[in-house]
Image (tube, rainbow, N blue to C red):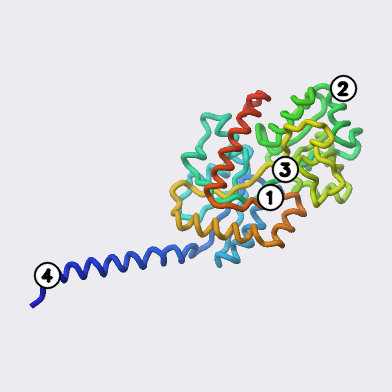
Amino acid sequence: MRNPHVKTLLSSMFAALLLAQGAPVAAQTYPDRAVRLIVPFPAGGATDVTARVFAEELTTRLKQSVIVENRAGAAGAIGIDQVAKSKPDGYTLGVSGVGPTAIFPILDPKLSYSPERDLDVIAGLSAVDLIFIARNNLPANNMKELLDTARANPGKLTYGTAGVAGPAQLQAENLAVAAGVKMLHVPFPGDTPAITAVLSGDVDVAFVGVASAVSFVTSGKLKALGVGSPTRLKALPQLATVVEQTGVKEFTGYTWNVLVVPKGTPAHVAEVLNKAVNEISAKPEIIEKLANVGLRTMPGDARSAADFVAGESARYKKIIEITGIRRE
């Protein structure tokens, strides 16, 4: 004689077993199609270089194409807004830098997205060392001479960066305040256009990622005045740091890139991506490849990446207060 209670119990156990087996299967099947990796700056810049190095490696590890898409504009805000508004399924990722992630939310209360509300930081990608480069016919050949030139010609020496109120402008203006000089900022939609303007003589100096500028320096098309990193670079070992040359110890000349996804992206997807990024960051050939263009890997779990971004937001808030810079 059949017991209906036993039958019900067995059915429930069978269903639970199917669910338990289904969860890891779902995790293992991600990704099952191509993944978009949005870069909020033009091709050729440090963020783009970072994205393409990791995209190539992720394609191999995930066994699906990771396709880089450049969505430049508004100093990175347009591309990251697109990530924030995408479906949180792991198939739209973003490489977000200091401006879109840590600075713009402080400066712009009407920003179309909120990193805290709309994004999750799931991995660190690269620290981007910045460099002051100049047109070859500029009289200044180092940072001391640059600041002396600016001091003698208040507001006349022009410098370009990748956008208004971006990390490069904030750090350059922080240096100017500390040194008691005034320079004229000229914003561009990315590092590459800023470098082009120096090459053409439209601006005197640019403060941009080493990854974007190193080939122009080594080829002799532009001259390097100083590097913003804490120590000298492997790529340009003879070039002294800004701190070495100026003595302004509070100056920090680097930016960073982190991997972000839309808020609500499944935890198992974030875990897959964080694990893959950390495995890539540990490869000696990747470390070397990035170091040769002035980039450093930023390994760690998702929590440490998010905590790092929060700390940087606090640091830039102080710089904004000191410089009085506002986003137009």
Quadrant housing residue 73: top right
- CA gap between label 3 and label 2 equals 27 Å
**Marks 1/3: CA–CA distance:** 9 Å
Residue drawn 81% across and 34% down? 203
Q: Is mark 2 on a helix, strand or loop?
A: helix
In this rendering, does residue 328 appear at all? no
Label 1 residue SS: loop
Amino acid carrying mark 3 in the image: Asp
Q: Is 227 situated above or below 295? A: above
In this view, the mark in front (4 or 2): 4
Q: How far apart are marks 2 and 1 (CA)?
A: 36 Å
Of labels 3 and 4, the one closer to you: 4
Give the quarter of the image for residue 281: bottom right
Mark number displayed over residue 152: 2
129 or 201, nearer to the observer: 129
**Of the residues under marks 2 and 1, which one precedes in the sequence?**
1
Question: Does label 4 or label 1 sit earlier along the sequence?
Answer: 4
Q: Which mark is residue 191?
A: 3
Q: Mark 4 points at which residue?
A: 4
For badge 2, the amino acid type reads: Ala
Q: Residue at x 70, y 46 (%)?
A: 128
Quarter holding the N terminus is bottom left
Q: Do the residues labelled 3 and 4 touch (CB within 8 Å)?
A: no
Residue at 49 percent of width and 39 percent of height: 116
